[in-house]
Image (tube, coloured by chain):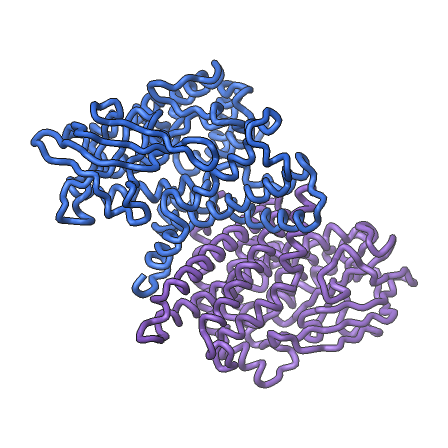
Chain colours: A blue, B purple
């Protein structure tokens, strides 16, 4: 007879058995292309039956958002259980059942600032993958200086009429709803912004994809021409949307940092040596130095999440994670290109998977710009963590 | 296991921090023993206090009278040692020699552990044979002679070797210089005939010995663990020393960083605090990020080592390399941001730079460990 199992061991055994029974074999492999990612939403077309089955199994179990309360579509797992589930999913290489700005960004903000009705309604939709969200933050004249945004909502009693333009709206052309920063008081810079939710199918909303250096168009310009937004779609207090925005940015930065992702012990040097061979000793040395940094950052990601779950760690820590994680990711893709040589330069051949390496490399250049530039991150660390004067 | 200290570990950290900041302070220990040209380079009185605090036996099993704790706990003490540049035999005696002795028989443990626990003895480790850490190659020979062995060869960078009552020496009992097998570890008493130590002062004011073994005759009971099978024990001792040195490096880096950010908030030029200049702010923020990552790597490595994970060796090398990089950046930026005063002996920031340099070499620098990360990862 085996020794009695402690609670974490019982949970681990249960999670392992559940994953074994419910995660289709096809979903236990690394994501190869965009169509392997399940974004959910009204118009999402599943790649295959397995992708759909995996999402449905997780929705039923609350595992698309395991640490959210059961009432909002989660599984109500504790920090320790959540970590065990992540470890068990990583162990079998299970793909995330659902990728969603609703989970990573809007969800945490609603959990903190939303009304009970909003939580039940919107969080449930997010957890079930029914609504795909996009984020209306940046404007043509408001990038790093986001608080200068001009999109304006005119008060019409029971609703606002929104006019203006957003830019770099990720997947706006594919999203169902938007969480959007709108100026509701022109006299007050910081306390004149409200956080609104609205349907992208509303009359007056239009999007225009932006062609990027990668040849892809993950971002759009988004235009609002007299868009009617009911007042109950305000999150948090009127004119206090900047508080919601900042809180959400913390989660966005965490998401972009890659803190939660991947097998933390898998080194790029090993992968590249296997795939393309690395004969140049100086490139090999660079890979080794990179792997030191990457494995150390993997530990940092684990520590960061462990601390976040129990309220330890500095509240501005996501800025450090975002800075370090994105700079590291850019370095990773530089090395992928260097190891790949001329094969990695191919732009649309079948052999290159449609220029996967080249396009992926170019895509990473946005990592240290989107969600706050590296320079802004360093400024925030200097001010909020190091308390340097005048920062 | 979450990657932060549990309540007991946080309590240990509090007490170690207070103790080291007070008793182990730079003026009281490092500067004092340096300025009197002490032949040991550290204070035996403080070592006795380490014993009273229970620190000396942190890694010694409870059955042998120690605290039976792990590398996380030893690292907590080492980080505070680093922060205060406290000279002590803790890393060599209580971390490395204690780990080696753990593989020894009752007789060896009975002979050497009590002195470690009560702070009356100091032990050193003799591994390196050249100016760079290269433990894969061991030339020092131990030949069977009579009832025991006869050792001959040279060892270098034996920190506090001349102050030690016993040296743990790695020697070759079989095979060629580069063979993994054929290594045996010996506990060599300081008064063994044929053992000579040439003590030299290092840049960080620590004393290290060049050791000469000229047919040093040892009884068979000086062997730690198995004859010819010492590589496993040696590796265990190396991992303990490496992750320990990494923890101390993080402490050195944090100490230098705290001094530097304090200075940025005090020093005025051009009518402003220099900490208001964005160029310095951003460099300080980058440094903060590097130190936090190094600290995370170190605690991950400590936990894996304590848990007996097969990934521990890889992560120990990551931790040693990353901590060396981050602390190295901290002391370099520290001296630069202090300006002229950073070049003076009177100011402590230069002492951090010196200690970091010595610690970076100890148990392998970032290049050695990055190379090891590649090899352990299969490329």
Can residue B354 be seen at all in this image of the molecule? yes
The residue depicted at 74 percent of the width and 59 percent of the height is B134
Q: Nearer the viewer, residue B1 or A150?
A: A150
Which corner quadrant holds the N terminus of chain A?
A: top right
Residue B78 visible in the picture: no
- Give the residue at the far right of this rendering: B146
Image: B143 above or below B302: below
Q: Position of residue B193 (x, y in %)?
A: 83, 74
A203 above or below B223? above
Q: Position of residue A217 (x, y in %)?
A: 41, 31
Pick the residue in front: B147 or A273. A273
Residue at figure coordinates x 55%, y 31% from the top left: A347
Horizontal side, residue B173 vs residue A68: left or right: right
Out of B116 and A253, give the one closest to the viewer: A253
Q: Is residue A29 left or right of residue B226?
A: left
Q: In this rendering, would A110 be left or right of A184?
A: right
Residue A169, located in which quarter of the rendered image? top left
């Amino acid at each position: 007879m085996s020794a009695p199992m402690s609670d974490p061991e019982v949970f681990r055994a249960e999670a392992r058995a559940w994953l074994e029974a419910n995660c289709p074999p096809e979903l236990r492999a690394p994501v190869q292309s965009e169509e392997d990612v399940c974004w959910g939403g009204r118009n999402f077309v599943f790649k295959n039956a397995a992708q759909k089955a995996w999402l449905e199994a997780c929705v039923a179990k609350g595992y698309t958002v395991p640490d959210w309360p059961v009432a909002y579509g989660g599984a109500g797992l504790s920090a320790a259980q959540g970590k065990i589930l992540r470890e068990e999913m990583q162990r079998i290489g299970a793909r995330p059942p659902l990728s969603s700005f609703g989970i990573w960004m809007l969800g945490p903000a609603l959990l903190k600032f939303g009304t009970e009705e909003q939580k039940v309604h919107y969080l449930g939709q997010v957890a079930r993958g029914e609504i795909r969200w996009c984020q209306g933050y940046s404007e043509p004249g408001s990038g790093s200086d986001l608080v200068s945004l001009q999109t304006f909502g005119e008060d019409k009693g029971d609703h606002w009429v929104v006019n203006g333009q957003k830019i770099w709206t990720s997947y706006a052309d594919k999203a169902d709803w938007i969480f959007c920063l709108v100026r509701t008081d022109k006299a007050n810079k910081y306390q004149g912004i409200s956080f609104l939710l609205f349907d992208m199918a509303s009359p007056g909303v239009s999007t225009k994809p932006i062609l990027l250096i990668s040849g892809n168009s993950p971002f759009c310009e988004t235009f609002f021409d007299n868009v009617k937004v009911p007042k109950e779609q305000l999150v948090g207090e009127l004119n206090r949307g900047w508080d919601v925005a900042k809180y959400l940015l913390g989660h966005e930065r965490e998401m972009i940092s890659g803190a939660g992702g991947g097998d933390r012990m898998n080194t790029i040097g090993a992968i590249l040596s296997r795939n393309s061979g690395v004969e140049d000793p100086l490139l090999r040395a660079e890979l080794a130095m990179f792997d030191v940094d990457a494995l150390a950052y993997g530990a940092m990601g684990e520590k960061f999440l462990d601390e976040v779950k129990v309220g330890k760690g500095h509240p501005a820590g996501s800025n450090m994670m975002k800075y370090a994680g994105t700079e590291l990711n850019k370095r990773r893709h530089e090395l992928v290109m260097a190891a790949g040589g001329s094969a990695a330069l191919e732009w649309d051949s079948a052999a290159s998977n449609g220029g996967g390496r080249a396009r992926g490399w170019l895509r990473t250049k946005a990592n240290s710009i989107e969600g706050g530039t590296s320079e802004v991150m360093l400024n925030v660390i200097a001010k909020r963590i190091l308390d340097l004067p005048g920062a | 296991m979450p990657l932060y200290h549990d309540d007991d570990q946080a309590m240990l950290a509090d007490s170690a921090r207070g103790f080291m900041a007070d008793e182990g302070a730079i003026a009281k220990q490092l500067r004092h023993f340096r300025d009197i040209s002490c032949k040991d380079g550290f204070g035996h009185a403080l070592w006795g206090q380490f014993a009273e605090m229970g620190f000396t036996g942190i890694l010694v099993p409870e059955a042998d009278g120690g605290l039976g704790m792990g590398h996380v706990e030893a690292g907590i003490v080492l980080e505070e040692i680093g922060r205060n540049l406290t000279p002590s035999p803790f890393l060599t005696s209580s971390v490395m020699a204690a780990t080696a002795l753990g593989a020894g028989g009752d007789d060896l443990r009975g002979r050497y552990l009590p002195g470690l626990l009560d702070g009356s003895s100091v032990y050193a480790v003799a591994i390196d044979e050249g100016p760079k850490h290269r433990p894969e190659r061991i030339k020092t020979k131990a030949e069977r002679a009579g009832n025991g062995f006869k050792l001959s060869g040279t060892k270098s960078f034996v920190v506090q070797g001349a102050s030690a009552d016993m040296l743990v020496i790695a020697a070759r009992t079989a095979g060629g210089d580069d063979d993994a097998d054929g290594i045996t570890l010996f506990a060599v008493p300081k008064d063994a005939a044929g053992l000579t130590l040439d003590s030299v002062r290092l840049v960080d004011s620590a004393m290290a010995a060049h050791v000469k073994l000229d047919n040093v005759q040892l009884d068979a009971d000086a062997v730690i663990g198995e004859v010819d099978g010492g590589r496993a024990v040696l590796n265990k001792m190396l991992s303990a020393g490496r992750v320990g040195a990494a923890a101390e490096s993080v402490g050195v880096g944090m100490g230098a960083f705290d001094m530097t950010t304090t200075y940025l908030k005090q020093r005025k030029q051009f009518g402003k605090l220099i900490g208001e200049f964005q160029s310095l702010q951003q460099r300080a923020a980058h440094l903060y990020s590097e130190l936090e990552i190094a600290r995370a790597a170190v605690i991950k490595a400590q936990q894996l080592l304590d848990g007996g994970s097969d990934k521990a060796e890889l992560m120990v090398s990551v931790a040693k390399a990353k901590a060396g990089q981050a602390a190295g950046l901290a002391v370099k930026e520290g001296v630069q941001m202090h300006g002229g005063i950073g070049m003076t002996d009177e100011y402590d920031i230069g002492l951090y730079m010196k200690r970091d340099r010595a610690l970076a070499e100890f148990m392998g620098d970032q290049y050695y460990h990055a190379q090891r990360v590649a090899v352990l990862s299969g490329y």
